[in-house]
Image (cartoon, rainbow, N blue to C red):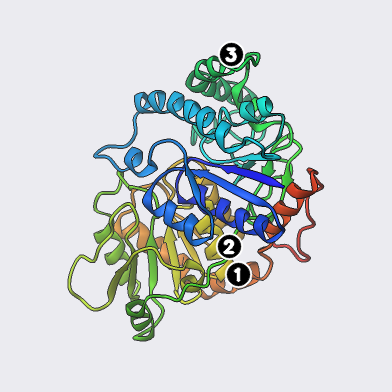
């Protein structure tokens, strides 16, 4: 069986596809992964044994400019991505049996599958973007907090129109060119009535959050047996567990003094500091020996050896920290991240920072919560029930041809 996996987005959108590709190959499938051509994503996929097919522009070039992407940038990018999907996926999926689409609103992927007559699956890495009458859309954080629940439907209708404004003209133009009828509601067309949810059932439950028939597989976690770099091992062995601070693919435009704030806040708690450079370019602020900066490393191996993880609240980082039993401080920036922060706080496995731009005082206070014995005990409980077989579950469902019922959640699931 031949399967094509497609995404466009940050590392958190690419790494899960590498995990699914590994699981599919182990079950005998032929897999192609279409992903952004960023150098680090190419290295990630190649390291997982996958030859990537470039799709769209590099993500880093879009998000790490001198200023955050503007609405005008979004209106330029959306039709570019639609065109890229029609061109790239049509060639990559020729002769394939199934196409799995993820990442930033993958308008166009379903149309390619429809034209080729192959199976289409939309997979998301969190439940918070699924149309619902229970909470407002991610695109409007904090809005309607005082409205009645029924008003959320109005907000989701507005969200559908926002997606249409970005994608519908380009999508229907390409559909017409290959003999397909127009789409009225792009968002619902992309999601389908039975999307897959590649998130852990404990960390990202979906029940009572949407009326769609969701298939939850568990998170797609890429196996990683890389050793930690020698200098990092030496730093870890030289004292008490440090606090890791890293924001992955976030440029952190709203917190330009983040390195200083992070280092001083961690020191205020009497801890050593481990900075993940990431796309924000975090670096030590002085020559003191209690701080080290590292590049891309094996987070699963690292997070079990730190006192806490301070991060942006991406689905992947949240899951890895929870799996490692590391207390978390989430400083959310965009999209689903505020809701991951709220979930971390609700589970008692860390603290949700209020807002995207921490001060020394606010981050130190959040760390004060995360570094308590009670939080550490709670993280150990949750770590014991986080699933690790999500990619294998998804691969079996895909190769078996069924949507399947939601896998059972572990016994004694924390709430």
Marks 1 and 3: which is nearer the front? 3
Q: Residues within 10 Å of mark 3 (few under 14, many from 20)?
A: few
Q: Residue at x 39, y 63 (%)?
A: 296
Give the x, y percent position of residue 280.
Answer: 31, 52
Hey, which residue is sitting farthest left in the picture? 287
Look at the numbered disc 3 and give the secondary structure of its residue.
helix
Numbered circles on residues, count: 3
222 or 306, nearer to the observer = 222
Report the residue marked by disc 3. Answer: 176
Asked if the residue at tag 2 contacts the one at tag 1, i.e. Cβ–Cβ closer than 8 Å, the answer is: yes
| Image quarter (top left, top right, bottom left or bottom right) of the C terminus | bottom right
Q: Residue at x 56, y 34 (%)?
A: 91
Report the residue marked by disc 1. Answer: 378
Asked if residue 378 is positioned above or below residue 62 in the image, the reply reads below
Report the residue marked by disc 2. Answer: 348
Give the x, y percent position of residue 383.
Answer: 62, 69
Residue 349 shows in the view: no
Instruction: State the image quarter where residue 168 is shown.
Output: top right
User: Counting residues from the N terminus, which is met first, the one under dot 2 or under dot 3?
Assistant: 3
Look at the numbered disc 2 and give the secondary structure of its residue.
loop
Hey, which residue is sitting farthest bottom in the picture? 238
User: Counting residues from the N terminus, which is met first, the one under dot 1 or under dot 3?
Assistant: 3
Q: CA distance from mark 2 to mark 3?
A: 51 Å
Give the x, y percent position of residue 167.
Answer: 51, 22
Give the x, y percent position of residue 90.
Answer: 57, 31
73 or 372, nearer to the observer = 73
Is 163 positioned to the left or the right of 63 in the image? Answer: right
Q: Residue at x 45, y 74 (%)?
A: 307
329 or 368, nearer to the observer = 329
Look at the numbered disc 1 and give the secondary structure of its residue.
helix
């Amino acid at each position: 069986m031949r399967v094509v996996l497609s995404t466009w987005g940050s590392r958190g959108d690419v790494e899960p596809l590498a995990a699914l590709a590994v699981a599919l190959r182990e079950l005998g499938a032929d897999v192609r992964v279409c992903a952004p051509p960023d150098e680090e994503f190419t290295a990630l996929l190649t390291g997982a044994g996958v030859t990537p097919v470039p799709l769209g522009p590099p993500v880093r070039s879009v998000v790490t400019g001198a200023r955050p992407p503007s609405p005008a940038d979004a209106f330029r990018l959306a039709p570019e991505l639609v065109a890229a999907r029609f061109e790239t996926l049509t060639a990559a999926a020729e002769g394939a049996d199934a196409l799995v689409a993820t990442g930033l609103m993958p308008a166009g992927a379903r149309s390619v599958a429809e034209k080729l007559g192959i199976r289409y699956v939309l997979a998301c890495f969190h439940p918070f973007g699924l149309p619902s009458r229970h909470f407002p859309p991610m695109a409007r954080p904090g809005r309607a907090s005082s409205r009645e629940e029924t008003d959320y439907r109005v907000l989701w209708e507005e969200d559908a129109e926002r997606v249409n404004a970005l994608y519908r003209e380009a999508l229907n133009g390409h559909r017409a060119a290959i003999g397909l009828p127009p789409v009225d509601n792009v968002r619902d067309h992309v999601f389908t009535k039975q999307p897959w949810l590649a998130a852990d059932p404990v960390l990202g439950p979906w029940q009572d959050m949407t009326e769609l028939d969701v298939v939850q597989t568990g998170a797609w976690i890429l196996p990683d047996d890389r050793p930690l770099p020698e200098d990092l091992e030496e730093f870890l062995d030289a004292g008490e567990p440090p606090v890791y601070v890293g924001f992955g693919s976030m440029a952190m435009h709203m917190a330009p003094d983040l390195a200083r704030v992070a280092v001083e806040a961690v020191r205020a708690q009497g801890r050593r500091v481990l900075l993940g450079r990431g796309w924000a370019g975090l670096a030590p602020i002085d020559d003191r020996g209690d701080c080290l900066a590292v590049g891309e490393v094996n987070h699963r191996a690292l997070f079990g050896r730190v006192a806490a993880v301070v991060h942006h609240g991406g689905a992947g980082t949240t899951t890895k920290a929870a799996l490692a039993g590391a207390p978390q401080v989430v400083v959310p920036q965009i999209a689903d991240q505020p809701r991951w922060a709220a979930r971390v706080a609700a589970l008692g496995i860390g603290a949700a920072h209020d807002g995207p731009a921490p001060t020394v005082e606010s981050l130190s206070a959040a760390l004060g919560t995360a570094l308590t014995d009670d939080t550490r005990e709670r993280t150990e409980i949750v770590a014991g029930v986080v699933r690790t077989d999500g990619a294998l579950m998804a691969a079996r469902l895909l190769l078996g041809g069924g949507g399947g019922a939601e896998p059972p959640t572990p016994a004694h699931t924390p709430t």
